[in-house]
Amino acid sequence: MESQVFSVVFGGLIMFSTYEQALQWIHSRLRLGIKPGLKRMEWMMEKLKHPEQQLKAIHVAGTNGKGSTVCYLRNMLQEAGYTVGTFTSPYIEIFNERISLNGVPIGNNEILELTNIIKPLADELEATELGAPSEFEVITAMAIHYFSKREDVDFVIFETGLGGRLDSTNIIKPLITAITNIGYDHMNLLGNSLEEIAFEKAGILKVDIPLVTTVEQETALEVMMKKAEEVKADVYRLNQDFFIGRYQAIKGGGENFSFQSCLGNLESLTLSMKGFHQVKNASLALMILMLLLEKQQIKITEDQIRIGLQKARWIGRFETVQTDPQVIIDGAHNPEGIASLLSTIDAHLSGKKVHIIFSALSDKKLEDMINPLSAIANTITFTSFDFPRVATAKELYDACKTMNKSFENDWKYAISKKLSVLTEDDVLIITGSLYFLSEVRSYFQELKTIEQ
């Protein structure tokens, strides 16, 4: 049960005294929606004496793969002895993981302290013509302030929340920028064409700051290269400046590949995370690492690179949450994510009968997600969960063109019902919205606890 909100007065300001109060205030700002633009962030950074200028940051944008790229880079740097902060979204298990240090979410007391610092600023800002900061702007300000005050932090990796150009994380001055890929997502805010979406993502490019990218669509690349030329940023592109070679899916799980680049080569690298898209994400992280080495920002051995890549795990990405029967969860929340999921299924689940449970938000390109899934599934079940903008189970069902479909409003019942009939030849894949996956993962964690 959530604790009842109450406040104490400290220094003439209304302050929070518990973590639950702080979190409730942060989440209450969701009502303000998404507020693109940097004016409010600039105002808060000025008030905080520009903590964003004190960070050694790396900025990662893209439609998919941001979290995994951040994870690979963090693990390699951490293996070399560096302390790495990360700012990611959304969270899968707990809110605190959005601001983490060496992969460990910051504590409840730290969230409480940060909220008590940022809330008075938010109140003051709301009284100006700029208006109140959004939830994401508040959390971004908290992260920047937190990492700037930690003397032990060597690098901070920031993942954009939405787009790039007008995203609140774009207030930072990074060492390197990265764009994972470009796809059709958040089109109501970013545009209806790849060129428009690429323009928003390329908005993170800064003067003389190199860009590393795995974007492959020529139309999107043209937009990015034009922006890079404007700001005199060197660009390092997959299949032009760095390459993936000798790729092979490892029987039993994981990937093996070689990495070649203009700055160095590495043979027979192993990943624990599955899917060729993860090889691309790891290669992007490797190219960033090579640039840091060239700039003499880091020292790292080949063994540390190999171990860091192999250790990297990112929950909710083709993650096995139960083995008997086998259940995999994957946050494929847009058409590009679905394409990567299908490729991974083909590489790692050959011979298995695939059953799918799917739920998504209504503002996604639903048919472009549902039809490819239903084409490879022995059965597909549509469900829903409690979240704003969520599509109903019946809406998803009606959007599906195949006959091997069903719908169930109660997602827990849908899972329980499917688990009761699965055999060792079957695998259940639960996919769709990351918010849905967060609830599903918690559900399976609870099941494990009960069984123990």
Image (tube, rainbow, N blue to C red):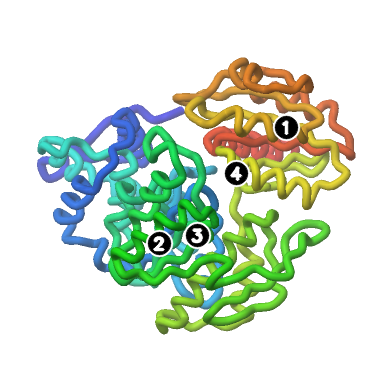
x and y percent of residue 383 in the render? 63, 23
Residue 28 sits in quarter: top left
The 10 Å Cα crowd at callout 3, few under 14, some 14 to 19, many 20 or more, is: many
Q: Which residue is mark 1?
A: 356
Mark drawn on residue 101: none
Q: Which residue is mark 3?
A: 70
181 relative to 404 in the view: left or right: left
Against 31, residue 145 (above or below) is below
Q: CA distance from mark 4 to mark 2?
A: 25 Å
The span from disc 4 to disc 3 (Cα, nearest Å) is: 17 Å
Q: Residue at horizontal 46%, vertical 66%?
A: 212
Residue at x 68% of width, y 72% of height? 258
Q: Earlier in the sequence, mark 1 or mark 2?
A: 2
Q: Amino acid at mark 3?
A: Val
The numbered mark, 1 or 3, whose residue comes first in the sequence reads: 3
Give the Cα distance between marks 1 and 2.
Answer: 39 Å
Q: Which of the numbered marks, if any, corresponds to residue 225? A: 2
Amino acid type, callout 2: Met
